Image: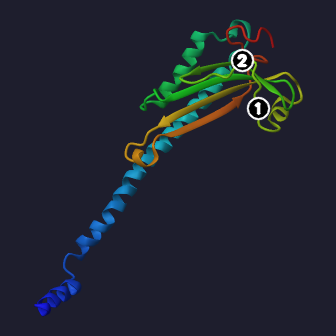
């Protein structure tokens, strides 16, 4: 009886039939994970590029307004931010947070929030202190204060289609500073009253 068991075991060890099927069964989960991961990574890269384009567009549109007749109202700001849905298409605009603010640099190191507008998020508090990157105001304002900057920020909560159980939602975000083009500052709902 033991001789029969030993023969069966020996034949199993030396058998080369169906080795490719066993190897494929061992490698298949890794290949499937790589394939589905590359699909999610591709979507994330495309979506991040769209978030960057939306951020640039919001900054570029907002900085073309000024004071007086070229001031921005809430309805105009709503129209400006609606450009994001067109840029993010065909992706949903629902998980997008948009913040457009004007920052007033009073010195090379001090800045406050002049006004702020948001969609699906929290706006900065008007008059609150804002921390600019080091040497940013000095290089941007050229020593002339007060100096106004438009800050556009877009963040998107991306949920991978296949890898969400591993990573959960991923926040893709970008922000850009621009300077007003038409006048020294951009007026939003009569704030600031003058530049």
Residue named by callout 2: 126
Q: Is residue 33 left or right of residue 140?
A: left
- Residue at figure coordinates x 61%, y 36% from the top left: 174
Q: Quadrant of the C terminus?
A: top right
- Residue at figure coordinates x 58%, y 36% from the top left: 173
Q: Residue furthest front?
A: 1
Element assignment for label 1: loop
From what the image shows, is residue 33 above or below residue 72? below
Q: Position of residue 169 (x, y in %)?
A: 47, 40
In the figure, residue 186 lies in which quadrant? Answer: top right
Cβ–Cβ under 8 Å for marks 2 and 1: no
Residue named by callout 1: 131
Q: Position of residue 122 (x, y in %)?
A: 60, 23
Q: Position of residue 94 (x, y in %)?
A: 45, 26
Crowding around mark 2 (Cα neighbors within 10 Å: few <14, some 14 to 19, many 20+) is some
Element assignment for label 2: loop
- Residue at figure coordinates x 54%, y 34% from the top left: 51
Crowding around mark 1 (Cα neighbors within 10 Å: few <14, some 14 to 19, many 20+) is few
* Nearer to me, 1 or 101: 1
* Nearer to me, 17 or 78: 17
- Residue at figure coordinates x 67%, y 19% from the top left: 116
From what the image shows, is residue 46 above or below residue 120? below
From what the image shows, is residue 115 above or below residue 16? above
Q: Is residue 171 left or right of residue 72?
A: left
């Amino acid at each position: 009886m033991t001789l029969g068991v030993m023969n069966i075991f020996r034949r199993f060890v030396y058998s080369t039939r169906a080795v490719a099927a066993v190897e494929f069964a061992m490698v298949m989960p890794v290949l499937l994970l790589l394939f589905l991961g590359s699909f999610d990574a591709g979507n994330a890269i495309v979506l991040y590029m769209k978030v960057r384009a939306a951020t640039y567009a919001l900054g570029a549109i907002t900085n073309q307004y000024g004071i007086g007749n070229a001031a921005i109202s809430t309805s105009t700001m709503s129209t400006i931010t609606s450009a994001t849905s067109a840029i993010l298409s065909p992706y949903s605009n629902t998980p997008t947070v948009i913040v457009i603010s004007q920052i007033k640099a009073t010195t090379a190191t001090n800045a406050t929030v002049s006004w702020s507008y948001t969609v699906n998020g929290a706006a900065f508090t008007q008059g609150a202190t804002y921390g600019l990157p080091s040497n940013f105001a000095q290089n941007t304002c050229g020593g002339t204060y007060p100096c106004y900057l438009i800050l556009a920020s877009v963040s998107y909560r991306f949920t991978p289609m296949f890898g969400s159980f591993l990573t959960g939602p991923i926040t893709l975000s970008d922000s850009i500073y621009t300077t007003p083009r038409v006048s020294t500052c951009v007026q939003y709902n009569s704030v600031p009253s003058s530049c």
